[in-house]
Amino acid sequence: MLLEPGQYFHRWDHEKTPKKKGGKVFIAVTYRGEVECHEGWLSHKQARRAREGGEQDETAAKPPRPELTGPMQNYVDLHRHAAVRAAMLDHPAVALRLVVAHAITGSGLWQVRREPQRAVTRR
């Protein structure tokens, strides 16, 4: 890590750590052009993280992005729900059994109210 010209490397703020275990190289350049290399050091915070469970690689791949955005997932869910409703209209006996099962068991999913379904938009 290259420090700004004139910026000092403070050993009291770092811990000696082998480069194999994640230690970094700090290069300090004075205003007169002198160069000092400090090999195998980590800040106290980074060293503590490394001791407590291993620090994840900074160069590790980013987590994969979801296949669909939030609004697009909402759109797909609305269409799935509409498809299930249409299938229930074609099979009224199954729909009746489903309603009776929910009524008998006292399911928390059993509610009688207007359906507030709508597409979610972000602004």
Image (tube, helix red, strand yellow):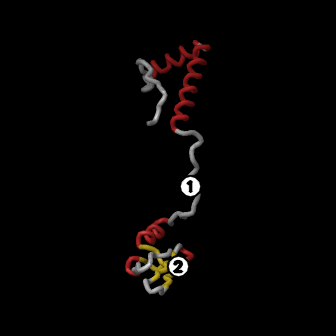
| One can see residue 117 in this view | yes
Mark 2 surroundings within 10 Å by alpha-carbon count, few (fewer than 14), some (14 through 19), many (20 or more)? few
Q: Nearer the viewer, mark 2 or mark 1?
A: 1
- Quarter of the image for residue 6 reads bottom left
Residue 8 position, x and y percent, is: 40, 80
- Quarter of the image for residue 106 reads top left
Label 2, secondary structure: give it. loop
Answer with left or right where residue 8 lies relative to residue 91: left
Mark 1 surroundings within 10 Å by alpha-carbon count, few (fewer than 14), some (14 through 19), many (20 or more)? few
Q: Where, quadrant-wise, is the C terminus in this rendering?
A: top left
Report the front residue among 50 and 99: 50
Label 1, secondary structure: give it. loop
Residue 68 position, x and y percent, is: 57, 39
* Residue located 57% across and 44% down the image: 66
User: Label 1 sits on what residue type?
Assistant: Lys
Give residue 85's mark.
none
Answer with left or right where residue 46 lies relative to residue 98: left
User: On the image, numbered disc 1 is attached to which residue?
Assistant: 62
Report the front residue among 61 and 34: 34
User: Label 2 sits on what residue type?
Assistant: Pro
Give residue 18's mark.
2
Q: What is the C-alpha distance between the residues marked 2 and 1?
A: 26 Å
* Residue located 44% across and 20% down the image: 115
Residue 86 position, x and y percent, is: 59, 18
* Residue located 55% across and 34% down the image: 72
Eyeballing the image, is 38 above or below 100?
Answer: below
Residue 59 position, x and y percent, is: 57, 63
